[in-house]
């Protein structure tokens, strides 16, 4: 299957071990990535090669949107609960793509966006907290071991949602 | 809704401008949140979030346009943006110029979404900038009916007459349907 992995580029350097774990587990299951962006983006950040505001964001958004169109499943590391995570979840749901949304659980008061996510009622959306890399590996491994059913769904227009 | 107290005056200003321009806000959610926050009457975790999300979606579907105060670049705003675009609703995303640098990835991401002509992103310095931005947006996408005169000739006239007879629809409705079909391809 083709999988699109989304995460927060802004914190990629801090989060790379988590993102790589997800990516490796996906590949171990024999799936392919719709867009191989993590390593190039991390290398760019490490080498401070290009300033982020100098990147071609029209192309980046287009590539990620096309990756979702192309993917069978979307995996999102959403600990930062950013604008683009919400955008991609709604976009993937509108195309009836199964989504695995992962976030690191900590002792903070529940994030308001975390509460908003909990209100999205769709069989296509699997939300899973994790605390450690080992736990993250198990969660992703189990998700792909159980292979989400890729059943043709009509486009999700949210009208009959809930 | 992060740092809601700081944003409340901007939200009220946006709402005032919308009403001054002869439109209305479908869901005045922020006054409810303001009351709840002031009285510390309800903890957020105890709210019915599926109902809130559903109301959000329904409100977008009912509305002619979506205006987002997006300086916090949060998840729910990204979600609502994609839902609104799916329903071909125009969006005005307003962001303070001094939004924290921490927000750069989403600030850049939003600039990439702006390739969609239905999504307009504007940066404002202070509340005094809002009126011009909101008025221009509402004028651009105002759905008030406009009467135009079309001179029908030859094939066009014959086509419309046939279609109108066959469907029982007015010629005006048929032309409107054809244009809407083309517009939704954009």
Image: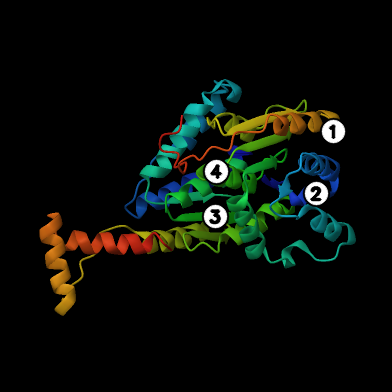
Q: Are marks 3 and 1 on the same chain?
A: no
Q: Are marks 2 and 4 in contact (CB under 8 Å)?
A: no
C-alpha separation, residue under disc 1 versus residue under disc 4: 27 Å
- Residue under numbered circle 4: A90
Instruction: Select label 2 or label 4 by which is in front.
Output: 4
The percent coordinates of residue A100 (x first, y second) are 66, 36
The answer to which quarter of the image holds residue B59 is top left
Q: Is residue B125 visible?
A: no
Q: Are marks 1 and 4 on the same chain?
A: yes
Question: Which residue is drawn at the image coordinates 61% and 42% (left, top)?
Answer: B75
The answer to which quarter of the image holds residue A14 is top right
Q: Secondary structure at mark 1?
A: helix
Question: Which residue is drawn at the image coordinates 37% and 63% (left, top)?
Answer: B183
Q: Secondary structure at mark 3?
A: strand
Q: Name the subunit of mark 4.
A: A
C-alpha separation, residue under disc 3 versus residue under disc 1: 37 Å
C-alpha separation, residue under disc 3 versus residue under disc 2: 26 Å
C-alpha separation, residue under disc 2 versus residue under disc 1: 15 Å
- Residue under numbered circle 3: B94
Instruction: Select label 3 or label 4 by which is in front.
Output: 4
| Nearer-N-terminus badge (2/4) | 2
């Amino acid at each position: 299957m083709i999988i699109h992995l989304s995460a927060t580029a802004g914190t990629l350097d801090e989060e790379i071990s988590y993102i790589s774990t997800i990516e490796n587990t996906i590949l171990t299951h024999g799936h392919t990535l719709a867009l191989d962006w993590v390593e190039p983006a991390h290398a760019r950040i490490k080498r401070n090669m290009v300033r982020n505001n100098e990147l071609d964001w029209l192309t980046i958004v287009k590539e990620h949107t096309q990756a979702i169109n192309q993917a069978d499943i979307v995996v999102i590391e959403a600990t930062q609960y950013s604008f683009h995570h919400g955008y991609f979840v709604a976009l993937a749901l509108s195309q009836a793509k199964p989504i695995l949304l992962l976030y690191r659980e900590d002792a903070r008061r529940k994030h308001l966006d975390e509460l908003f996510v909990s209100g999205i009622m769709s069989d296509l959306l699997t939300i899973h907290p994790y605390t450690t890399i080992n736990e993250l590996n198990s969660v992703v491994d189990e998700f792909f071991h159980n292979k989400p059913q890729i059943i043709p769904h009509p486009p999700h227009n949210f009208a009959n949602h809930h | 809704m992060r740092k809601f107290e700081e944003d409340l005056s901007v939200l009220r200003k946006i709402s005032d401008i919308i009403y001054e321009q002869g439109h209305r806000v479908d869901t005045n959610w922020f006054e409810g949140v303001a009351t709840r926050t002031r009285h510390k009457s309800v903890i957020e975790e105890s709210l019915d979030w599926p109902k809130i999300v559903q109301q959000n979606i329904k409100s977008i579907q009912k509305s002619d346009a979506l205006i987002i105060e997006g300086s916090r670049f949060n998840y729910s705003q990204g979600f609502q943006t994609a839902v609104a675009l799916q329903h071909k609703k125009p969006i005005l995303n307003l962001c303070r110029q001094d939004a924290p640098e921490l927000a750069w990835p989403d600030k850049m991401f939003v600039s990439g979404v702006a390739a969609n002509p239905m999504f307009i992103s504007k940066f404002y310095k202070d509340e005094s900038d809002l009126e011009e931005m909101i008025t221009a947006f509402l004028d651009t996408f105002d759905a008030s009916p406009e009467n135009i005169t079309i001179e029908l000739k030859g094939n066009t006239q014959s086509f419309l007459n046939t279609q109108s007879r066959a469907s029982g629809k007015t010629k005006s409705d048929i032309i409107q349907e054809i244009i809407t079909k083309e517009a939704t391809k954009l």
